[in-house]
Amino acid sequence: MKKVNVKIQVEKKVDNRVNNTGRPVNKKSARQVRLNKQAAYIKMNKSFVQGKKFKINNDNSNTSYVYHVNADDKRDNKYGHISNDFTHVCNVEYIGRTKVLGYTFVMGRRINVTINLKEVKFA
């Protein structure tokens, strides 16, 4: 008996959805506005977490802040800290979608810091 190799071809079904560009999107609809806001919030959060320099809107000085991750110190501060060009500013204890919560100590008292990412300008 001889062995015969048989080639089997599977046809791809094409239902023409690939060629359809879809209907036009109403950019003013509530859904599109919500999706654009969510995309902007995700972009802001990624910029903050990646450590891009940012300025707070109501601050007119040239001070820019940077978020740093503490990779080695996972016990106390798993999120890291914010610093400016010269010194450590505050520790970060929570990073949300649009808010960052932190704290610092001034004269032995704990001061809570809240940064709204909507009011921040990234460099």
Image (cartoon, helix red, strand yellow):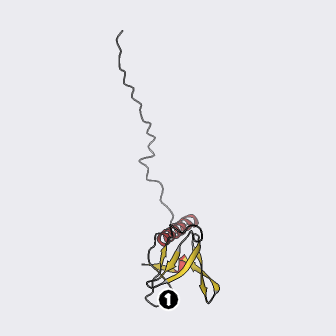
Q: Residue furthest top?
A: 1
Q: Quadrant of the N terminus?
A: top left
Q: Residue furthest right?
A: 109
Q: Is residue 110 above or below residue 25?
A: below
Residue 26, position as x, y percentages in the image: 51, 64
Amino acid type indicated by mark 1: Asp
Q: Residue at x 47, y 54 (%)?
A: 22
The secondary structure type at the circle numbered 1 is: loop
Q: Is residue 110 above or below residue 29?
A: below
Count of numbered marks: 1
Tell which of 63 and 30 is nearer to you: 63
Lateral position of residue 115 relative to residue 19, left or right: right
Q: Quadrant of the C terminus?
A: bottom left
Q: Residue at x 59, y 67 (%)?
A: 75
Q: Residue at x 37, y 21 (%)?
A: 6
Q: Is residue 43 above or below residue 61?
A: above
Residue 73, position as x, y percentages in the image: 54, 69
Residue 113, position as x, y percentages in the image: 60, 81
Tell which of 98 and 62 is nearer to you: 62
Residue 77, position as x, y percentages in the image: 57, 71
Tell which of 14 and 70 is nearer to you: 70
Residue pointed to by mark 1: 59
Q: Residue at x 50, y 85 (%)?
A: 57
Q: Quadrant of residue 29?
A: bottom right
